Amino acid sequence: MKTNEIKLKYGFNPHQKPARVYMENGDLPINVLNGSPGYINLLDALNSWQLVKELKSALGLPAAASFKHVSPAGAAVGIPLGEQLKKAYGVEKDDLSPLAAAYVRARGADRVSSFGDFIALSDEVDAETARIIRREVSDGVIAPSYSKKALEILCKKQEGNYRVIEVDPGYEPGEMEKRQVFGITFEQRRNDIKIVPEMLNNIVTGKKDLPESAKRDLIISMITLKYTQSNSVCFAFDGQVIGNGAGQQSRVHCTRLAGSKADIWFLRQHPKVFEMKFRDDCPRSVRDTAIDLYLRDEMTPQEEAEWRKLFDKVPEKLTAREKEEWLSKLDGVALGSDAFFPFSDNIDRAAKSGVKYVVQPGGSVRDEDVINACNRYGMVMVFTGIRLFHH
């Protein structure tokens, strides 16, 4: 049903009442088909929808995003999963639909952070994708349309309260946007720049070879950064985000955060993880956290005591050497940064996580140092001249 206003239970926090979203002119481009989305749900929905719409437009593939607190935990396009990823993501079916594969990948980038996510899907949601969503802890979904069966499945989730939003795929906002802070109105042209492959032409390193798969992953990283709270650095590989370092004040902390997430993503595919014998009554979300604790090796004695209760057989420790050997196999990763690298330490950290392709605006007084670091590691780096801050 068309409307120009949705009244909300509250704003960011329960004490922030009243709250609403509305259009000053015309009807809202969204229709709530089920559930009651909140203020933050809608911020996630509208940001994530733009991301997947742009991914689909740029790469011509179905796209998905998994959002938490107005930043993507993961994003991906619909590329078939290999056997190793199927195991890591808990997928038993041999051939997922492209849209289902995109969401499995997006959710799989950082499964701990994606707990309670808001999902965006670029295409009509099919029953298979709905079944994948049904098994996950999620707050809601936005898409341009839903098959009859998919809608039936989703509307039963969360005892009938799962938030399902339909968005007009043809809607384009006006050129200018505004917001209020402390009673003061800010206005700017919205960030309507289109991320296209031609932006990757200015290669500044000695190594120039940029395969199509790397171009795809660099585009994924850039579009993801466009809708990530700044500062941000994004690692992408095999058609998906594998680590997104969002909202850090220091650029190198973004790179460290994204790199550590990429490492965990790859370590989740280690044979010792696949051999873990969880109790049958252990939910997926608890298993995700348990694997994360196992790989980070940061448990307190009390935490470990509870962790050990989750298994029929407590797994053997994954040693530092085993981790190092496994991570040495990760190669060909793409990295995007929403602003220039001020120091080459970002490149040093990126190299530890298999990065071979880098895209960033350039423009630092130390650009030459960063280029030299890339050359030492045999990386290909592109300067776009385009900053992608998002707040």
Image: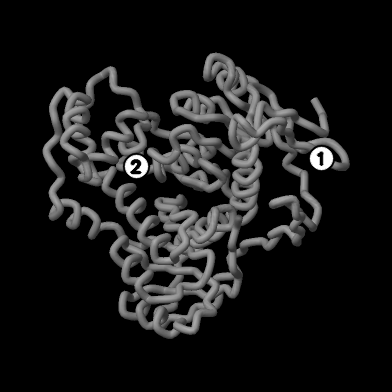
Tell me which corner region of the image, top left, top right, bottom left or bottom right, holds residue 351.
bottom left
**Numbered circle sitting on residue 118:** none
Q: Which residue is mark 1?
A: 23
Q: Position of residue 14 (x, y in %)?
A: 60, 30
Q: Position of residue 2 (x, y in %)?
A: 82, 29
Horizontal relation, residue 361 to residue 290: left or right: right
Above or below 192: residue 34: above
Horizontal relation, residue 263 to residue 156: left or right: left
User: Residue at 31% across / 79% down in the picture?
Assistant: 376
Q: Which residue is mark 2?
A: 85
- What amino acid type is highlighted by mark number 1? Met
Q: Indicate the secondary structure of the residue bearing disc 2.
A: helix
| Depth check, front residue: 83 or 202 | 202
Q: Indicate the secondary structure of the residue bearing disc 1.
A: loop
Q: Quadrant of the C terminus?
A: bottom right
- What amino acid type is highlighted by mark number 2? Leu
| Depth check, front residue: 68 or 207 | 68
Q: Earlier in the sequence, mark 1 or mark 2?
A: 1
Q: CA distance from mark 1 to mark 2?
A: 43 Å
Given the current orientation, which residue lies at the most extreme right position?
A: 25
Contact (Cβ within 8 Å) of mark 1 with mark 2: no
Above or below 223: residue 377: below
Is disc 1 surrounded by few (<14), some (14 to 19) or many (20+) residues within 10 Å? few
How was this image coloured?
one colour
Q: How many marks?
A: 2
